[in-house]
Image (spheres, rainbow, N blue to C red):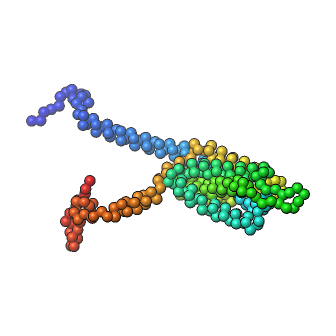
Amino acid sequence: MTASPKASQIQNPRAKISSTDLLQHSAVSATSTNGDRESQQVLSSGRKRGGWVTFFFVSATLSGLMIAGWGWLTNLIVYLIQEFNVKSIDATQVANVVSGSINLVPIIGAVLADSFLGSFHVVSISSLFSLLGIIVLTLTATLSYLRPHCGTGSSLCHGPSKLHLAVLYLGITLASIGLGVVRFTLATLGANQFDNPTDQGSFFNWFFFTFYVACVISSIGIVYVEDSISWGVGFGICAAFNFLGLLIFLLGNRFYRHDKPQGSPYTSLARVVVAAIRKRKVMVSSESKDYYGEINDGDDKSIASCYST
């Protein structure tokens, strides 16, 4: 005969619960609770962060930074010739090096954003570099002792000194790094705010439309100010737009989805190379227990299957 349960157990099923049952119940409850929290975080992040609300901040940042960047880059050759007494061929070479560097720097920015810092920090730092570089250029245009000068009442003009070139190249380098990195990293950050590929495609259309409109405005308006009014005012306007773009970008931080760095792929490749070099003289074992998987004979019959720990 099978013993019937006591009345107290029937009336109160929780009176007799083993520790194993309690642990299993707690584990299931904890798992479901964690799952609910994760789903709630995804839902809350999807509602509060990302989406088209971020497009205003991204497009405004892009407009400010591109107006600032194209304002000094487009007229760089003329600035070097008129204000620093650089020969036209040398000024053209400098401009070519700067343009090529601006097109290569985004590779470094992409590696830093994907592997180490994330897009938000890379855009913030590069925008700050651009601002500092334009400020230095503004100082070279406004402070007479930071650029060469012509003798009073004489057409003989002195070339730039080492100090002049050092300050000038410092400003150009910082501004070039900022302009080169921010363009495509900002595009990546903006596209990551959307889950739907259709929305991402629409974002890229508006992104590059804003990009080229800002470049046209800068190439016309700021270049006119630099040529007709003064270089100091023109570079000052560039610095103001850069600061405004950086400020708007930081204000939108609460609305962005922040991508997590995935780690550098080159680290894993380097580990493989190092391990191969260090173990190049290791003797290969002939015992099946030292390997994962199955060892087959000539007839493709499994003769061993060992998984070592």
On the question of residue 137 being in view, the answer is yes
Image quarter where the N terminus lies is: top left
Q: In the image, is residue 47 above or below residue 82?
A: above
The picture places residue 268, in percent across and down from the top left corner, at 42, 58
- Between 259 and 96, the one lying in front of the other is 96
- Name the residue: 56% across, 60% down: 107
- Between 221 and 264, the one lying in front of the other is 264
Left or right, 257 with respect to 149, comes to left
Looking at this rendering, what residue extends furthest in the top direction? 8
Looking at this rendering, what residue extends furthest in the right direction? 153
- Name the residue: 32% across, 39% down: 27
Looking at this rendering, what residue extends furthest in the bottom direction? 298
The picture places residue 45, in percent across and down from the top left corner, at 51, 44
- Name the residue: 37% across, 41% down: 32
For residue 35, what is the image quadrant? top left
For residue 48, what is the image quadrant? top right
Looking at this rendering, what residue extends furthest in the left direction? 1
The picture places residue 8, in percent across and down from the top left corner, at 21, 26
- Name the residue: 26% across, 61% down: 291
- Between 44 and 5, the one lying in front of the other is 44
Left or right, 227 with respect to 271, comes to right
The picture places residue 181, in percent across and down from the top left corner, at 60, 56
On the question of residue 210 being in view, the answer is no
Task: Count how many numbered circles sit on residues in the image.
Answer: 0
